[in-house]
Image: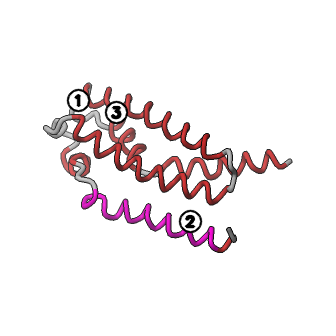
């Protein structure tokens, strides 16, 4: 695959990430969006059950992870990278899901930051922006 085609595909995938973020309310019926915008300081969590919220967050994590993995594979062109990325994203999902469940079951109004940031790590492609410099550094160190 030529470099030009790779960069075009990466650009298209980045646009997909932007679309997921821009249309998040339309694609994902996440009740926590409004909660963290308006009522997080005083109100209890929405009456929605954890599993309903979790399914939406998990779907969004899967979509962002899939797009992010494709971007990383196109950027770094390493065959053994896919196994590492799948393991990384799966492990991060399990750990963050456990934190999310704990925070959901032990939430007190006004003490929202940990829940907010765990959810944010799950619904935004933060790991993409962490892995790009990490993998670039690893590639440069390996090449020495």
Q: Are marks 3 and 1 in contact (CB under 8 Å)?
A: no
Q: How many marks?
A: 3
Tell me if mark 1 has few (under 14), some (14-19) or many (20+) residues whose alpha carbon lies within 10 angstroms of its own: some
- Dot 2 falls on a residue whose secondary structure is helix
Q: Main secondary structure of the magenta part?
A: helix
Q: Which mark is residue 10?
A: 2
Residue 21 lies in the magenta-colored region = yes
Separation of residues labelled 2 and 1 (CA atoms) = 42 Å
Please give left or right for residue 101 compared with residue 90 in the image.
left
Q: Is residue 70 above or below residue 16?
A: above
Tell me the residue that label 1 is attached to: 108
- Dot 3 falls on a residue whose secondary structure is helix
**Front-lying residue, 108 or 68:** 68
Residue numbers of the magenta segment: 5-27
Residue 52 lies in the magenta-colored region = no
Q: Which mark is residue 100?
A: 3
Q: Is residue 11 above or below residue 36?
A: below
**Front-lying residue, 108 or 54:** 54
Residue 134 locus on image (x, y percent): 65, 46
Residue 118 locus on image (x, y percent): 39, 38
Q: Quadrant of residue 58?
A: top left
Residue 141 locus on image (x, y percent): 79, 45
Separation of residues labelled 2 and 3 (CA atoms) = 31 Å
- Dot 1 falls on a residue whose secondary structure is loop
Q: Earlier in the sequence, mark 2 or mark 3?
A: 2
């Amino acid at each position: 695959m030529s470099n030009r085609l790779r960069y075009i595909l990466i650009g298209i995938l980045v646009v997909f990430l932007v679309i997921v973020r821009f249309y998040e309310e339309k694609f994902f019926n996440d009740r926590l969006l409004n909660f963290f915008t308006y009522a997080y300081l005083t109100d209890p969590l929405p009456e929605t059950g954890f599993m309903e919220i979790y399914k939406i967050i998990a779907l969004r994590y899967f979509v962002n992870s899939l797009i992010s993995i494709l971007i990383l594979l196109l950027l770094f062109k390493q065959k053994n990278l896919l196994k590492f990325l799948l393991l990384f994203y799966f492990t991060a999902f399990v750990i963050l899901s456990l934190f999310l469940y704990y925070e959901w079951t032990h939430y007190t109004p006004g003490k929202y930051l940990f829940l907010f940031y765990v959810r944010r790590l799950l619904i935004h492609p933060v790991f993409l922006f962490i892995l790009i410099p990490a993998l670039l550094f690893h590639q440069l160190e390996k090449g020495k």
